[in-house]
Amino acid sequence: MCGIIAYRGKRTNAGELVLLGLKKLEYRGYDSWGVAVKEESRVKNQESRIFVCKKTGKIGELELKKLKLPAGQLAMAHSRWATHGGVTQRNAHPHASCQNRVVVIHNGIIENYLPLKKKLMKKGHTFISETDTEVAAHLVEENLKKYKGKVSREVFQTAVRKALNELKGRYAFLFMCKDSDVLIAARRGSPLIVGIGEDSEYFVASDIPAFLEYTNRVMYLDDEEMITIGDQHGFMNIQTGKPIEKRVITIHLKAEEAEKGKFEHFMLKEIMEQKETIHRAINQDEKLLKKVAKAITQAFGTYFVGCGTAGKVCMAAEYFFSNIAKMHVNSVFGSEFSSFQHFIKKGSLMIAISQSGETADTLEALEAGQKKGARLLTIVNVEGSSMDRMADLSVHLNAGPEKAVASTKATTAQLALTLLLAYCAAGKLNEGRKVLVEAASQINDMLNPRYEEHILKLAQQIKNVESMYVIGRGVNYPMALEAAIKLQEVSYIHAEGFAGGELKHGPIALISKGTPCIVLVSNDDTREDVLSNAMEIKARGGFIIGVAPKREEVFDYWIRVPDVGSASPIVNIIPVQILAYQLAVLRKNDPDMPRNLAKSVTVK
Ligand code: M6R
């Protein structure tokens, strides 16, 4: 959930370097931030120090320029998404032990921190934050107690390993000690990637773009692994201490892809990229698609699992498979999966849909399914992510880095790929490709400045409303839920999505004069019914915003979408993405980093 980065190498501006890298990870959390630099000792034999600076809020450009960091070749930085303890400077990372001897940075949750904290306090340790993290710094310091002054690489490593073995929960950790020149990183459940630069230069971060301008050669830390980085590195298993060999992988990702370029916000850039990303998502190896489709048709029960937006795509998958392949598949939110795991057995198939491949709830569902013998398949955007690596079979969305917290291009890529799989399972791969290629070309025509202006006019008209609603039928029902998420997370307007037919069973009581209601319409057998539902809302004073291929009488405001047959949920969600973005900007919200959220939710 938090962003972490460290550097160890020959450069003497390590502090500055990690903070610039951290800016690129801010999408992972932006409540507060902090940096630790192992200071170069100017006087021989002088005791070394770790400089620590922490602040609340996002990292401001100006603040960065003003910050006076000491020179140093070893540094680490953190941007936080608060879990334990409020958003205060004290609770910001890095956290230090009593004597500032050990400094740590952490992403995840330590479940047993309270008993450990009590035990350490009895031994005389003083805690200054409310976080679960601080306990790790004190534990390592306790393990180093009998060693005075400089400690060897092995001693520091053993002290960290012993501490890690006492911790319960999920984590990605970075450790520094003022009496050692070594950096230690460890992982259980939260991502950590090691970048290998030139000349014994190392980077460790939660995501590759943080160091991509320096190197594209990486090694992945897996669960229960730690790495000790001095002039050379060594991986080992945290529990057993046994050394581990790792492969260096070259990543083919361009640094510019992860930049905003000419756009003011990542969200807008990513919306516009949908002109190409649908093509990239469906441009898959035919053999792989057929293998996946076969796995689905032969499975003893298929479960699509995802969270948030990806969870809504899983719901859409139920409709796609039912309508196109005449097959029943299940969809479950990652966080709800434990109630359904009883149905999983050998022969069951779980398909995780995820942009990041790191969402803790989805990962936990996969782990539970794996234990019960399910086959695991993943549809992810981030190659090399935890889900990607744990799957028996993995398909990549190829949408390029998605940095804005609100998912846009990854969502439509997920929809396109899932729809294509439904066609493939029905033995109609070519037909599916044709539908999607046509949809992609229509999206290309649709995303023009005039279209944006038309939606902006609507945004200006409704920007001060308190609530709005979205309805849809059939596959437009999960899209209505997704549309509501988009509006909620960036505009902060209360928005809810409903199945059109459900309105009359309760929610219609919420409609009063002028309440905006978006109606998602497809030119299929749900059209008439959803238009009747729109009439019912209009009769109660609602302001009807139609997203539809044709202007209908009931609409007060019409946003045209192309008629693309079964791909219509893909085109229907795009104008809502644009509307949500424009409402956010008009309401002076930051669409890329909305309040209380983080891009990658690596806590339960
Ligand atoms: O990385 P994932 O696709 O697994 O993320 C799942 C959700 O956290 C994510 O879709 C979230 O709902 C987005 N912010 C929605 O825009």
Image (tube, helix red, strand yellow):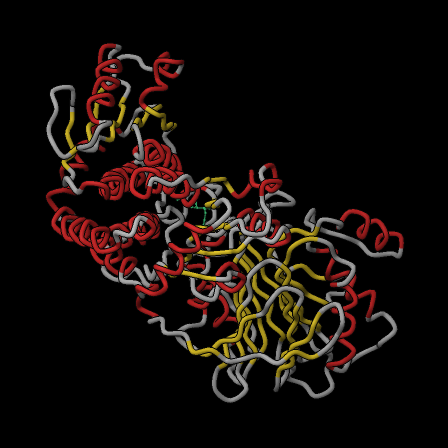
Rendering coords of residue 400 (x, y %): 33, 62
Q: Residue at x 89, y 57 (%)?
A: 123
Q: Which residue is drawn at 61% across and 45% down?
A: 83
Nearest the viewer among 559 and 505 is: 505
Q: Quadrant of residue 35?
A: bottom right
Q: Quadrant of residue 78?
A: bottom right
Q: Number of numbered discs present?
A: 0
User: Taking the image as drawn, is residue 361 in sight?
Assistant: yes
Eyeballing the image, is 518 above or below 111?
above
Nearest the viewer among 507 and 448 is: 507
In-image side of 411 versus 357 (left or right): left
Eyeballing the image, is 570 above or below 224?
above
In-image side of 62 versus 245 (left or right): left
Rendering coords of residue 19 (x, y %): 49, 66
Rendering coords of residue 409 (x, y %): 31, 52
Rendering coords of residue 553 (x, y %): 11, 20
